[in-house]
Image (tube, rainbow, N blue to C red):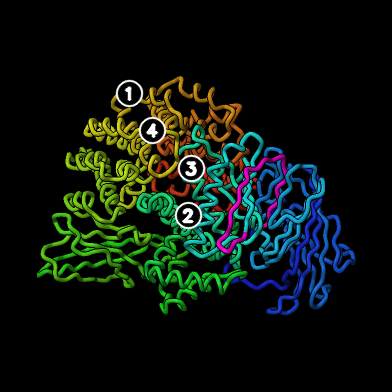
Amino acid sequence: MRDAAPQTIHLSDYTPPNWLIELVELDFTLDPKATRVTSRIRFFRNPASTKGDLHLDGEQLTLISASIDGVSLSENEYQRTETALTIPADRLPDEAFIWEAEVEIAPADNTALEGLYMSGGMYCTQCEAQGFRKITYYPDRPDVMAPFTVRIHSPMPVLLSNGNPVERHGPVAEWHDPWPKPAYLFALVAGDLLSYSDHFMTMSGRPVALNIWVRRGDEDKTHYAMGALKRSMKWDEDVYGREYDLDVFNIVAVDDFNMGAMENKGLNIFNSKYVLASPETATDRDYEFIEAIIAHEYFHNWTGNRITCRDWFQLCLKEGLTVFRDQQFSGDMRGAAVQRIDNVLQLRARQFREDAGPLAHPVRPESFVEINNFYTATVYEKGAEVIGMLKRLVGDDGYSKALDLYFTRHDGDAATIEDWLAVFEEATGRDLTQFKRWYSQAGTPRLSVKSDFSNGTYRIEFKQETKPTPGQPDKQPQVIPVAIGLLDSSGAEVEPTRVLELTETRQAFQFHGLKSRPVPSILRGFSAPVILDHTPSFEDRALLLAYDTDPFNMWEAGRSLSRETLMAMLTDDTPPAQAYLDALVRVAGNDTLDPAFRAQVLALPSEDDIAQGCVEAGLVPDPTRIHATRKTLTTTIAEAGRETLETVYDQMVTDGPYSSDAGPAGKRSLRNCALRFLSLLDGPLRARAQYDAATNMTDQLAAFACLLDAGDTDVAARFHEQWHGDRLVMDKWFMMQVAHAAPEDAVNRAKILTEHPDFDWKNPNRFRSVIGGITAANPAGFHDPSGAGYAFLADWLLRLDKANPQTAARMSTAFETWRRYDADRQALIRDQLSRIADADGLSRDLAEMVGRMRTD
Ligand code: B3K
Ligand code: ZN
């Protein structure tokens, strides 16, 4: 049952709820096909509004009975649609009443993985954003917060819900969560699970039991996640002064999950990919993600759960802030410089791409049809950047004061961006009126730079400009903090970092008393999410790459040289300059630099980054040519750096037992980077030896990739033979074969893999491995001039949409860049978008995405 006419919801239409809730009691009798849910809810009139109707959301529910204050309601006493049940105000008591209802639902039929569903024989839930309405009738909006008591009846050995355990008698368990929460944070799990347990003592001396629950057989892969959880708990106390507030913290790993994880109060539910790890099965990158996501969900306990969002337009209030906090944490755990570069790479790859296309929207969107479509890189990553800018503008002390005020003033609230900015204004005395545009204006500002030097004064002038985005033709100037330092021609820093605050469209700044024309290092630490349109001379960039004190800009200088080299090769076949190759090889062999950083400098921009670079330079990207050119440059670098790369490969061996710490992981990253280069020169021998000797998945997978690139015909079968029993490793097996197929063969390879007996398309991880393998990891294959990649994606989106609209909609963003390409490719993509749009029974999720992509 779907909404007949999907409606657009507007931020400007927000009205407070008529009725609030004092206590919720839920009782579940679990059954795959017929779960009974009874609810007993004490409502009271919202003192801030006059008495109004009671509006309860509810979808796909079979209503068995309903009553108010113990009196059964007959059908003519309420209105019921496919999405709601409304009781008119005149049928309700004036101040307070008890609503009771019984409904029936079928978790085994729930393939959308939203609400109560089943995964690998266990029951689990996903309620954010609007899944609770598929469990029972309820005001499913984040500004209605209540304590919950939950009783679960099931023969399953483990029965979990939010809060603290109250009692367990045979097949019945009761949980109570004293902290008022919105329904989207509700969770229930029931299954034959095992736990890995530990404990944590909070800073005020409260003992907390920690459990990570997994399916039988996975219990040995939970230790790393547990360590990450304890580090997160300690860090939030040390850095933000926030401690945990229940007696237990449970994490459950499930195999079928639409995204990474979910911060349900006291009962986080995770995609098993972001919990389970062993050296043999998980890569260093997996370990890094596990640590970051465990931290992210844990940090939500304060930024999201204790202080939640008034409405879904305020999503960045919890997500932007929590991403910012998890990025700070990862920087502290693994090295700030390398983490910052990684974060910016992600931001540019996902958010700049989004901002440049038809799906561009503000950090705080103003309307939506399906809120699940707005869990985007803009809300998350740009939302985090906005907080980073705020911190830079008010300073570390100002930030801490503002956060303390935020926590004390809004604890227990459903808050807004206005509330958030107000604490900064009050704590620091700063007027943030103009700054607030970062929340309402979509698009990536482009910053161009002019400078001159005379009589010891360096003058730098900036111009900011943001291109129109859907619904926003005219853009206003934004507050842009530009961190800048100056070097002299020997590479010495003559002016340490200072933050220039741009507020005008054009604005100039001066530095006096300089002996010679300086080399500026602009936007240090990537101090604002903007496109810096500034191409210093080759010599200046080589100097920054060698001497900048700011590691981000050091990396950026190399990146800019690589990008420029690729552009010149693409446009007129200009061969790479020897000086560029030398500079890169010098970094590769520079033992004074962190190996992880050296690997980041050596990594060329991805094919999609290059395509985006073409657009920024006013060119039409050709994915086929980009793929070939990038490969040519990789080979040229390998030839220029052969000796250094061989030395690096031999030196960067990690001895002793595997550790996922930043140090050894960085060494492996550099060594495997050298392996990629050298394999292009020498063929598969080195990779084969590494594959055979590998004792961890990082090294095995890196070698696997090189062997696939080299056309090794046996390695996929060997890998399958070794790992077919491990779901998460098999996801890698699927993904790598598509990602490393030759572009002209990629669609075919993907099709063959979708026919493999291990391909379970209803499992989002597996679906993403193959279909995402081609759209995200093999752009030249996806954009094959025949259009076969586009048709392949459209076929699968239409199929998946019937089962799981949320993931189908998410995967459709592969089409968001269609305007970048030549007329033929544009026409082919448009045909597929029309085909999807015209399909019968399209979900609200996919219909909204396709509609937005077509109308720009
Ligand atoms: N808050 C969840 C995301 C929910 C997505 C719903 N489509 C995970 C997170 O951001 O931590
Ligand atoms: Zn989050």
Tell me the kind of residue under disc 3: Tyr
Rendering coords of residue 390 (x, y %): 41, 68
Ligand 1, image quadrant it occupies: bottom right
Residues under numbered marks 3 and 2 in contact, where contact means CB atoms less than 8 Å apart: no
Bounds of the magenta segment: 186-206
Tell me the crowding category of disc 3: few under 14, some 14 to 19, or many 20 or more residues within 10 angstroms, Cα based.
Answer: many
x 82%, y 49%: residue: 169
Tell me the crowding category of disc 4: few under 14, some 14 to 19, or many 20 or more residues within 10 angstroms, Cα based.
Answer: few
From this view, report whether residue 480 is shown above or below residue 848: below
Q: Is mark 1 within 8 Å of ligand 1?
A: no
Which of the marked residues, 3 or 1, is nearer the chain's N terminus? 3
Q: Is residue 31 magenta?
A: no
- The residues tagged by marks 3 and 2 sit, at their Cα atoms, a distance apart of 22 Å
Residue identifier under label 4: 655
Tell me the crowding category of disc 1: few under 14, some 14 to 19, or many 20 or more residues within 10 angstroms, Cα based.
Answer: some
Q: Which mark is residue 683?
A: 1
- The residues tagged by marks 1 and 4 sit, at their Cα atoms, a distance apart of 26 Å
Residues under numbered marks 1 and 4 in contact, where contact means CB atoms less than 8 Å apart: no
Residue identifier under label 3: 287
Residue identifier under label 2: 377
- The residues tagged by marks 4 and 2 sit, at their Cα atoms, a distance apart of 38 Å
Q: Is residue 194 magenta?
A: yes
Which of the marked residues, 4 or 3, is nearer the chain's N terminus? 3
Query: Which circle, 2 or 1, is nearer the viewer?
Result: 1
Rendering coords of residue 179 (x, y %): 67, 64
Snapshot quadrant of residue 490: bottom left
